[in-house]
Structures are given as structure tokens and as C-alpha cells.
Image (cartoon, rainbow, N blue to C red):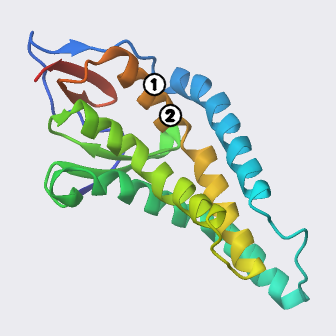
Amino acid sequence: MRFKLGPIPDEFTPDSSWRPIREPSPLVMQFFATPMALGMAFVVGYGWHWVGMPASLQFDVHDAAVFLFALVLSFPALVVVHELLHAAVHPGWGLSHCTILGAWPRRLLFYAHYSGPLSRNRFLCVFAMPFLVITVLPLGMAACGLKLPDTMKWAVAWVSTLNALAAGGDYFGILLISLQVPQAAIVQNQSWRTYWKPA
């Protein structure tokens, strides 16, 4: 595993056997992904309401300060866990030289990039894993009757919904790959651009 500050690495030169998918620039992608993220966060938030969130929490001043501090810290912690879950689906559990964790401050973007080829279905799993683990799994466990203290349930619901909101680029990527790449294909990124060819 490697770490990088700056743009997504460009370590792949596709030959004529690779076909580019039709995809917008990162900035335009965010424009399309944001409504998807808002819609999914609304659905997940309603899901938490449906499983029976406590109506309110009773805090003293100290507990309220700790809770608010934890909410503020939850975002950077969520970013790290989200990207590690992407990387965990890479070959070698993300520990190989091909996995690159990075931050691109100019674009306010964090990424887990794999510099080698992946099967189309594994590529989709890389996109989906943080949403499945951080958002869907806790909500599913709550729907199945998992009992948590009220404060813990609010915290888990917050992280679950926040992750649903943060995963807009993942939803958009799943849509692009699902619509344009045949199931029996391999996929590889050249920086943020995506190419595929028959397996």
C-alpha cells in the first residue's frame, strides 16, 4: 500500500485493446452525484426512522459536549474507514504496491486507487463496499432487532446516514460501469479515467 498527496496517479497507458467509458470530469461528476447522494441519505435517514429511533436524548452539559465533539470527529474518521473499505476489496486486501490511498486537496477528494486491472464485478464491489458495511449493515442489524443504548443508536444512525451522503461518487461510478461495461470484462483506471476490455 502506498500513500499520495495530490491527483490520482496516472500509471497506466492503455493500448488499442482498451475502450474508454463515457464519463464526465471529476467536477461535473460531483454535480450529477450530489442529487444521488442526497436522495440516498434521505432514504437511509427514513430507514433509521422506520426502525424506531428514540424521539430525543437527555443530556447534561458534559454529555452534550462529548456527543457534539464525537460528531465533529466522526467525519474524518469516516473518510479514513470509507477509503480503507474500498482498498480492502483490492487484490491482496489492499496491501499490495498497486493500492494507493490518497488525498487531492484541490478537489476536496479522498481516494483508494488500484493501479492494476480488475474484473468488472470486483470493480463494482470496490465501489459498493463502504456503503454496504457502514450504511446498510448497521441499518439491517437494527431492522432485525439489535438493541443499542439510545445514544449509541443515534451515533450509529448518524454515521450510517453521513456515509450514505458521502458516497455519491460511488453510486455514480456503479451506474457508469453497470451501464457501459459488459459483465465479462476487465477494468482499469488511468488516473480518474476508466477503460475496459473483454476478459
Q: Determine if residue 71 is in view.
A: yes
| The C terminus, quarter of image | top left
Q: Is residue 1 visible?
A: no
Is residue 11 shown above or below 183?
Answer: below
Q: Which residue was labeled with disc 2?
A: 171
Rendered view: 101 above or below 8:
below
Q: Determine crowd level at label 1: few under 14, some 14-19, many 20+ residues with C-alpha closer than 10 A.
A: few
**Which amino acid type is shown beneath numbered disc 2?**
Tyr
Q: Quadrant of residue 194?
A: top left
Give the percent coordinates (x, y) of residue 38: 69, 37
Residue beneath the point at 21% across and 20% down:
196
Q: Position of residue 128 (x, y in %)?
A: 42, 44
Q: CA distance from mark 2 to mark 1?
A: 6 Å
Looking at the image, residue 67 sits to the left or right of residue 182; the answer is right
78 or 134, nearer to the observer: 134
Residue at 54%, 20% in the rendered image: 28
Residue neighbourhood size for the residue with mark 2, other residues' Cα within 10 Å, grouped as few (<14), some (14–19), many (≥20): some
Viewer-proximal residue among 131 and 98? 131
Is residue 11 placed above or below 88 in the rendered structure?
Answer: above
Mark 2 vs 1: CB contact within 8 A: yes
Quarter of the picture holding the N terminus: bottom left
Quadrant of the rendered image containing residue 23: top left
Q: Which label belongs to residue 72?
A: none
Image point (53%, 66%), residue name: 77
Residue 181 drawn at (x, y percent): 29, 18
Q: Along the horizontal axis of the image, is 49 left or right of 14?
A: right
Q: Amino acid at mark 1?
A: Leu
**Element type at mark 2:** helix
- Element type at marker 1? helix
Mark number displayed over residue 175: 1
